[in-house]
Amino acid sequence: MTDDDLWRMHHEIESMPYGPGQIAALEQLLRRADAGDDRHLAFAARVTGTTAYVYGGEPAKSFVTFSWCLAEYDKDPQPYHQRYTHQLLWFFKYMVNAMVKFPELPLDRTYAVLDDMERRYRDSGHSLQAVYKHRYLVAAHLGDDEAAEQWYRKWMTTPRDALSDCAGCDPTTQVAHLARHGRHEEAVALAEPVLAGRLTCSEQPQGILTALLTPYRETGRTDAARDAHREAYRRVRGHLADLWDIGEHVEFCTVTGNEARALELVERHLDWLDRAPTPAAAMHFAAAASAALRQVPAELTVHRRASGERPAADVSVGVLADELAGTAIALAERFDARNGTTHQSGLIARKLAAGPVGEHLPLSASLRRPTVPAPRTGPDGPAATPQPVTVPADAGADELLALAEECWRTNRRDGLVAALHAYDERFGDADLPPTTRAWRLELRAGELSQDDDSVPAAIEVNREALAAWREVPDPLRAQVVAGRLGVLLSMVEESADEGLTLARESADYLSEHGGPRDRAAGWDRLALAHVHGERWAEALDALDRAEAEAVADPWLAGRVALHRTHVLEQLERAEEFREAAVRSRRLAGELGDAEMLTGACLAYARATEDAADAVAACDEALSVAPAGAYLPLRVTRGRALMAADRAGEAVEDLAEAVTLCVEQGLEGDALLRWELADAYRVAGRLAEAAEVAEEAVLGLDRAGAQAEADRCRHMLSGIYAGLGETDLALAVLDTLADNLDGPDNLPHRAQVLEESGGLLYDADRDALAAQRFAAAATAWRLAGFQVDELRARRRELLALHWSGDLPAAVAAIERVDEAAAALPAGADERPVVTYERAMADDAVARVLIGEDRLTAALDRVAGVPERLRSIEAFGEAAQVEVLTGELLLRDGRPEQAEGLLRPVLGGLPSGSRPATQAAWLLARALDEQGREAEAAKIRADHGIEED
C-alpha cells in the first residue's frame, strides 16, 4: 500500500466505532506504518491508538502507545508534533485513571505520572484544575478522606481551561463525591443544569446518569432513577470499557428489588469478566454480580461461555455467586496490598452485602408485578356469575350423585366437589348397591380429569368405573364411561390407538341405543379423540353429527360449538370458522359460563377480521376469565390492538403476558418479548423497544431458536438506527451477516450487508460503506438476484466516489456495467430494471465528472431522464436533468444549459433542494451569457445569495 493508502486507512480507522474491530484495524495499520518510513503516520497512528485502546476496553495497551509518543515528542521534536500537543497533555488524564486500576502497577509510578503531568501543564501555561482532579481521584481510591477533601477543594476552586474534563464529566465526578458522602440532594441539584444542557462527550450522558442512580433513589425520585438506569444502561451495554458502570447498574437492580433483571444483566455480561478492561472493573462487576445472584434461588443456572481451557457450561447461581465473591475479594486484597490500606476490601464487602432496600421500583420494560386484570364490560355486558350450589342436608346417596353429575354437566366444579364431598362424608363407608358404587367411581373419574396432570390417575379410575358398570351390568353407562376413557387414552401417545377404538365403539353404540343427548355426547367425545390425533377432517365430521343431536342440551351444544370452532380453525376454513365462533360466543354468553365464554371469545378474536371486534371480544372474556386464561387473553388482545394500530395500548397487554409467562415458568417468554419489543417500536418508544428486543434475542439464542433470534436481531438493528445508535445497529447487522452464512440464506445475507452499507453511507463513513455494498452485490449475484446486484454495485460506486478514492471509484464502473449488462433488455423490460439501469448511468456520470471526462459523462446521461419519466420516476428524472445542466455549464455550453434548466425548474416544487440547485445553475448560465439582471432575478426569486 502507498503512503496515501495508509493515511486513508488511518482516516477510516478514526471514524470507526470503539471496540475490537477498530483495535484490529489499528494494529494492522501500526505494523504497516512501522514497516515503512513515514514517522508522522507512525506517530499519528499511536495517538489514535491511545484513545482507541482506552475506549475500546484495552487500556493497558494505551500505556505503550502513549509512552512511545511522549518519548518521540521529547527526544526528537518534529514540526508535526505540535498539532498533537493538546492530545498528549490530555492523555495524561487517561494514564492516571487507568494506572490506579491495575494493582500490579506501584503507586509511585502513578504519582510520577501525576508530577510529570503537573510540570507539563505548568510549562505550557495551562490551569492545574485537571491535575488536582486526578490527585483527588487517587486519594479517593486509597480511601484517604482528608487528602481527597483537600484535593477536591483545590479542584473546585481552580479555573477550568481547555484541558479540563467536559461539562458532563467533571460534574459526574462531583456527583459521585457527594453521593459517597450521603449528600444526595446536593448531587441531584448539581446535575440538573448539566442534564438540561447539551452533552457531546462520548462518556455522556450515561456517565452522570449512572452516578445519579443512588442520589435519585435516596431522594425518592423513583421515576428519574428508573429513566436514568434505562437511558444510561442502554448506552453502556455494548461497551466493554464500561464494565465497571455496568456493575453499578447490576447493583441498582439488586437494591431496587429487580432480581430477575439483575440476573439478566449478569448473564449478558458474564463473559466480559474473562476480558475485563481493568482488574478494578472486574472487581466491581464481580462483587455486584455476586450480590445479585444471591437474591435468586441457588438452584437456578446461568450460561457461561467458554474461555481458555474452561468449557462452556450452565453454572448454578449459588456456585457462581461464591466464585465471583472470591474473585472480587482477592482483587480487593491485591489493591489494598499495593495501596497499604484496607479501603478497597471494605468497599467490596459492602457491595457483596447489597440487597433490596425500600419499596420495589419496577425497572423492566417487559416484566410487571403480578396484577389482577381490571373488570371489563363486553358489548353485551358481563356474563352472569352462577349462584353457589346448595347441597341438601337430607339428600340420599343417589340424589347427591345426581346433583354432582348435573354440576359436572353444567361445568360447575365447585358444586361437583361439594356434592361428592357430602356423599363421601355421609355414605363413604355404607354398603350401597353396585349401581351407586359404579356411579361414584364414574364421577370420581370426572373429578380427576379436570386437571391435565391427573390424566394417568383418571385413566385408571375410568377403567375401574368401566369394569364396575359392566359388572352391574349397564351397557349404556358402560359405553358412556368407555367414551370418556377413550378421550383420556387418546391424549397419551402410547395408548392413542386404544383410545380412538374405545371412543369410536362408544359413539356407534350410543348412536344406536342412546337418546339425543347420549348420541351428541358420544360423537363429541369421538371428535375429541380425533383432535388429540390431529385428524381434523374426521373430528369435524363427528362434530357435525354431534351438533345435530345437541339441541336438547344447551350446555352440550355450547361445548360442541366451541370444539367445532377449534377444528375449523385448524382446517383453515376461515369463513366457517368465523360463523362458528359467532355461534359459540352467543351460546356461551347465554349459558353464562365463564370458562366456556372465555374460550369462545378467544376463538372469535382470532376469527374476526375486524381488529376492534377482536379487542372487544377479549374485553368481554377478561370480565369473567379464570386466572388460567389471562395469559392467552393478554396475548390475543395485544395482537388485536397491534392490528388495530393501537400499539401504545398493546404494550400493556403484551408486557402483562410476558410477566405471566415468566411467573408461571412457561416456555415462550422470549417470543412474547419479541412481540412486545415490536409494540414498543411501533408506539415510538424506541429505548424500551431496544431493551426488550435485547432480552428477546438473549432468550431466543438460549433456546436455540436461531431463525427467530436473527429475525428479532434484524428488528433490533432498525430500532438502534432509529435511536441514532449507528454503531450498535452495525454490530447487530454484522452478527446477522455472520449467522446467515449458508447458501440458503444468501438473499437475506445480501439484504443485511446492504442495510449495513446504507447506515455507514448515511454516517459519512463512505469507504466502509463501499466495502459492505460490494459484499452485498457479491451475495446478490450468488443468490441470482441480478437487479439487486446492480443496485448494490451502484451504491458501492457512489460510496467510493464520496470517499474521495477516485481510482477505486473509476475501477468500480466496470463492475457496475457488468451488472447492468447481465440484465435482460427489450421492450418488455420491467420498470425496476429500467430504474436501476438509469440510476447506474447517473452514478457513473458523477464519477466521470471527478475525472473531468465531461463528454463521457454527458454521453452517459443522454436519454436517462426520458427513461425515468417512462416509469413515472419524475423526481429522479429531474435530478438527472439538473446534473446534465451542470455538465453543460462545465463544458462551456451555457445556452444549452439554460434551455434544459428552465423547464426543469418550472416543474420542481418551489423551495425544494433540487429547485434551489436548478435555480443556482440557471442563474450561472445566464451570468455566463452576460444576462446578469435575469440571473439576479432568478436568485432573488429563489432566495439564493449572490456568489
Image (tube, rainbow, N blue to C red):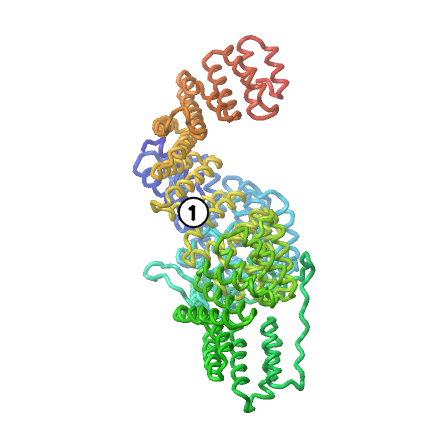
Side of 907 where 485 appears, left or right = left
Q: Position of residue 373 (x, y in %)?
A: 63, 62
The total of numbered circles placed on residues is 1
Side of 889 where 812 appears, left or right = left
Read off the residue under disc 1. 19
Q: Position of residue 163 (x, y in %)?
A: 53, 42
Q: Quadrant of the C terminus?
A: top right
**Residue at 47%, 69% in the rendered image:** 508
Is 929 in front, or is 418?
A: 418
Question: Which quadrant of the figure has residue 624?
Answer: bottom right
Above or below, comparing residue 502 to residue 633 in the picture: below
Above or below, comparing residue 725 to residue 787 in the picture: below
Question: Which quadrant of the figure has residue 322?
Answer: bottom left
Q: Which residue is most to the front?
A: 512
Q: Which residue is most to the top?
A: 930
The amino acid pointed to by label 1 is Gly
Tell me the SS state at disc 1.
loop
Q: Position of residue 48 (x, y in %)?
A: 42, 41
**Residue at 42%, 42% in the rendered image:** 752
Is 30 in front, or is 845?
A: 845
For the question of whether residue 160 can be seen, the reply is yes
Q: Position of residue 60 (x, y in %)?
A: 40, 51
For the question of whether residue 298 can be seen, the reply is no
Q: Which residue is most to the left?
A: 35
